[in-house]
Amino acid sequence: MKITIGSRVFTVTLFDNDTTKELKKILPITLKMIELNGNEKYYHLSTDLPTNASKPGTINAGDILLFGNNSLVLFYETFSSSYSYTKIGRINDISGLKDAVGTGNVDVTFEIK
């Protein structure tokens, strides 16, 4: 998968699970992702996705996870978390990710490459 933020394109390695398979069915999609906590952007999808949540302990910059059954989350900082998420994918090279997402809400396009 690839995601586009402004002029930046990032390649994503997807996990092989039911959540990812269902997400791929609604792609391509451009979302106005909302800033939260200075470490993530999220969007509440109109479609619920299947879940298999676990507590990762550490969230890494570049992780793309599902919170609950419909909140798509793109993390741009690494930190510890006690929350549960379902794994979707991970950006292969996060160089420039933090600058690309900026400090406010941002449009992000998700598509299969």
Image: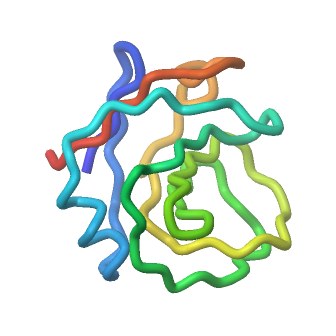
Q: Is residue 39 left or right of residue 12?
A: right
Colouring convention used in this rendered image of the protein:
rainbow
Total tally of numbered discs in the picture: 0
Quadrant holding the C terminus: top left
The residue lying at 38 percent from left, 21 percent from top is 8
- Quarter of the image where one finds residue 22: bottom left
Residue 2 horizontal/vertical position (percent): 28, 42
- Quarter of the image where one finds residue 38: top right
Residue 43 lies, with reference to residue 101, above or below; the image says below
The residue lying at 42 percent from left, 66 percent from top is 48
Residue 27 horizontal/vertical position (percent): 21, 48
Between 61 and 68, the one lying in front of the other is 68
Between 63 and 32, the one lying in front of the other is 32
Residue 35 horizontal/vertical position (percent): 69, 30
Residue 61 horizontal/vertical position (percent): 64, 48
Q: Is residue 77 left or right of residue 79?
A: left
The residue lying at 47 percent from left, 27 percent from top is 32
Residue 69 lies, with reference to residue 10, above or below; the image says below
Farthest top residue in view: 7
Farthest front residue in view: 46
Between 90 and 112, the one lying in front of the other is 112
The residue lying at 57 percent from left, 50 percent from top is 73
Between 26 and 79, the one lying in front of the other is 26
